[in-house]
């Protein structure tokens, strides 16, 4: 604090054309840093992924806007696959235990993270949630992110895949409006298909927008409420699960993921062109 | 407002650097922010002002550097500058693959205080 005027580092003043009123500070110096803002989250995410891999758990990060039906999709999925595949759920919401209660009602274990004011889950929080649960060895861990189509995009949780749930009541132009999320999702679930006759939602146009951002995206059309289209979604969950593969295949899959992850990091760092 | 989380991370980096390199105040933070990174610059500046109040970076200026984002067309391979995640290829209109523009990095700092000679970085 300036001892002359008591002010706290306002912009430099020049009085009567004289030297700058400098608050008596010594000269500043430059310090190179080169620190990535996501590096710490990414390190936690890598640790989570290693933890999942060592238990042969496939982790899925479910993202969407609020009210798209993530929890309803999970409940419908858990009811149908429990007994067949080991599963567990991490629920993320700003407040309440409601979603974890809905999951537990299906008989599947759930841990609720309440983020308070935060608008997304991060890898650090997911790591701590894992300490409060038994990972479903050889099975599926669903991480339901905070309902928000913007903020969760930047934060890798250590999940193997990101699943974006979009309901037909939200509008078919969401991919271009929220490109970060669509660009980074591995699968798109278009939910509430039973409401399609009542809304102006062009399925083909929506998918075309999504694929323009992300050509490799897998797309499912379903209704969690009626069960229509759920089989394809569940086949995808089964096919990519660890539980069906031999140990060798699992190890290969882990290595492939690791390679893909490193390639993605190189690409982000601008060191690789594809 | 994930910008608050990112602003906290900037502050954490500054505090860590202050411990490692022996400075007491940060006056300016040079931040590289790719135009395709999912950050609103005004929201980030506002959040940084709020989280840095009463810290070694109180009143510090967040100076943003926006390197142009580069993309390559997924169809014809043409390289071009991307203004947004959905900028089409100027040659054939095809979708772009991002080559750069997602950066979020503290590049360097202008600092004072402490003894520059005590820097552990050598």
Image (cartoon, coloured by chain):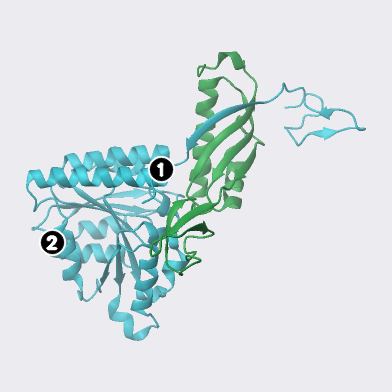
Q: Which chain is drawn using green?
A: B
- In the picture, residue A190 is in which quadrant? bottom left
Look at the numbered disc 1 and give the secondary structure of its residue: loop
Q: Is residue A111 above or below residue B19?
A: below
Q: Nearer the viewer, residue B74 or A118?
A: B74
Q: Which residue is mark 2?
A: A81
Q: Chain of mark 2?
A: A
Residue A161's x, y, as percent?
27, 54
Question: Which structural element holds mark 2?
Answer: helix
State left or right for residue B99 relative to residue A162. right
* Residue B112 horizontal/vertical position (percent): 65, 24
According to the picture, the residue beneath numbered tag 1 turns out to be A271
Above or below for B81 versus A46: below
Distance (Cα) linking label 1 and label 2: 42 Å
Which residue reaches farthest right?
A16
* Residue drawn at 29 percent across, 37 percent down: A47
Residue found at the very far left of the displayed protein? A246
Q: Compare marks 1 and 2 and give the one earlier in the sequence.
A: 2
Chain painted cyan: A
Instruction: Tell if the residue under mark 1 belongs to the same chain as the one under mark 2.
Output: yes
Residue A148 visible in the current orientation:
no
Q: What residue sits 89% from the left and 29% below the top? A: A18
């Amino acid at each position: 604090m300036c001892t002359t005027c008591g002010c706290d580092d306002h912009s430099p003043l020049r009085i009567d054309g004289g030297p700058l009123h400098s608050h008596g500070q010594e000269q500043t110096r430059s310090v190179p840093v080169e620190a990535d803002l996501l590096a710490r989250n990414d390190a936690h995410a890598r640790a989570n992924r290693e933890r999942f891999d060592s238990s042969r758990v496939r982790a899925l990060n479910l993202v969407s806007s609020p009210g798209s039906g993530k929890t309803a999709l999970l409940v419908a999925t858990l009811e149908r696959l429990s007994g067949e595949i080991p599963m567990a759920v991490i629920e993320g919401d700003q407040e309440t235990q409601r979603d974890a209660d809905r999951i537990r009602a299906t008989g599947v274990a759930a841990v609720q993270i309440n983020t308070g004011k935060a608008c997304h889950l991060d890898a650090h929080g997911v790591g701590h949630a894992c300490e409060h649960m038994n990972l479903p060895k050889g099975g599926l861990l669903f991480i339901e992110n905070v309902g928000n189509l913007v903020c969760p995009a930047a934060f890798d949780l250590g999940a193997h895949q990101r699943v974006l749930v979009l309901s037909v009541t939200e509008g078919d132009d969401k991919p271009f409006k929220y490109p970060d999320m669509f660009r980074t999702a591995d699968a798109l679930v278009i939910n509430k298909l039973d409401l399609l006759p009542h809304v102006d939602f062009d399925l083909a146009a929506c998918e075309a927008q999504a694929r323009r951002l992300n050509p490799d995206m897998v797309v499912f059309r379903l209704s969690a409420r009626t069960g229509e289209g759920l089989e394809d979604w569940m086949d995808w969950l089964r096919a990519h699960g660890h539980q069906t593969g031999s140990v060798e295949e699992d190890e290969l899959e882990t290595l492939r993921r690791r390679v893909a992850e490193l390639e993605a990091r190189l690409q982000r760092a601008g060191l690789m062109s594809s | 407002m994930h910008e608050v989380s990112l602003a906290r991370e900037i502050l954490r980096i500054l505090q860590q650097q202050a411990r490692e390199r022996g400075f007491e105040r940060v006056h300016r933070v040079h931040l590289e922010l790719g135009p395709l990174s999912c950050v609103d610059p005004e929201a980030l500046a506002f959040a940084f002002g709020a989280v840095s109040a009463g810290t070694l970076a109180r009143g510090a200026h967040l100076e943003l550097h926006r390197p142009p984002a580069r993309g390559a067309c997924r169809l014809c391979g043409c390289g071009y500058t991307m203004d947004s995640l959905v900028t089409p290829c100027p040659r054939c209109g095809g979708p772009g693959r991002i080559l750069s523009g997602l950066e979020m990095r503290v590049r360097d700092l202008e600092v004072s205080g402490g003894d520059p000679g005590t820097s552990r970085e050598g």
